[in-house]
Amino acid sequence: MAIKVGVIGAGGMASYHIDGFRQAGGEVVAMADVNEAAAKASAEANNIPNVFGDVAEMLASDIDAVSIIVPNKFHAPLAIQALEAGKHVFCEKPPAISAEEVGEMIAARDASGKYLMFNFNNRARPESREMMKLINDGVVGRINSAQAKWCRRTGIPGFGGWFTTKALSGGGPVIDLLHMLDLAMYFMGNPTPSYVMGGTFDDHITNKGFKGPWGIPDREDGVTDVESAAHGFVMFETGQTLSFQMSWAEMVKREEVSVVFQGVKAGGKVERLFGSDGDDATAIDTCELYVQEDGKSVDKSIEVEECEDMGRINSAANFIEAIEGTAEPLNNAEQGLALMQIIDAVYRAAETGKPVAI
């Protein structure tokens, strides 16, 4: 029997989830959104038979799993509601708006015995998969340090909407662009964070000249109270270290999405440099390994197939495969908790100007 999935949230990311679930043999049978008209439009466009304006009604149906694609504030309550209804949960990033909420989600998962996974889609990119094969095969050795970066020159996703309202989003680029922080920790073996130092900056956050070419419409009566950039450093209990840079609006040459790491046996880089105005079509993807051979420095390019969706479809497919037991899950909720602990600590460090222990 195919896994029956209901989608909560009719936004733009829904199509990636739907394609991924279907790629893995799942059956997408329901769409729910408080805006029932939007749910009907999305359901019609994606050939989904059932539409709900009330999530509780959808959870009372015979679906096996849900995906959650709503503003960040609602991730935890909806995930807990679905888990308590006996459904597996695939939740968009970030896991929640605080580590405390993720802990509550984990408790609900444990009580239900169901899967709780997050859309850390960059783990599912072909570059990341190939790099993880090398890491798992022992080619890289222990990764001592890494640098995670997702920085934009002009990438604020609208003004006054939920992205820029901390009560709804939990924060700005620190929480929105957490992917490379997650990917670096994935490569490093998901070590336990020990303490965090960091600073946030709000330069340009209300400047319309730094708005991105995508996102949501501006709300003139809305709130814009999040950071525009953050830089920081994480020390792990293992002694491994990680520095990071995340920004929506910062004086850089072009949008860069990358993880660079230094292993004992080899270093490496997974990078995407976007084109003008964040254009995917002209992005440059690089995957490299740095080794010493016969006393010489050798840079090896790792060739993979193109993946313009940055792993989003394969990430959703992995959720179905994990439930069915045909693939190992690409992430778990404990890893989401560690990530949110770091994010919470970044904001506390920025407020206090002092290192924050986890």
Image (spheres, helix red, strand yellow):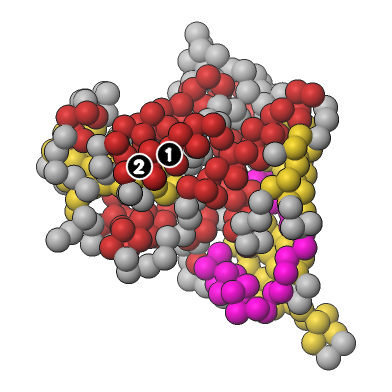
Residue 241 location, quadrant: bottom right
Element class at badge 1: helix
For the record, the magenta segment spans 127-151
Q: Residue 91 carries which label?
A: none
Position in image of residue 49 (x %, y %): 12, 42
At x 65% / y 78%, what residue is drawn? Answer: 138
Residue found farthest to the front? 111
Given the image, on which type of amino acid does mark 1 rest? Ala
277 shown above or below 283: above
Could you tell me which quadrant the N terminus lies in? bottom left
At x 63% / y 23%, what residue is drawn? Answer: 226
Position in image of residue 202 (x %, y %): 72, 24
Q: Relative to 261, is 126 on the left or the right?
A: left
Could you tell me which quadrant the C terminus lies in? top right
Position in image of residue 279 (x %, y %): 54, 48
Residue 44 location, quadrant: top left
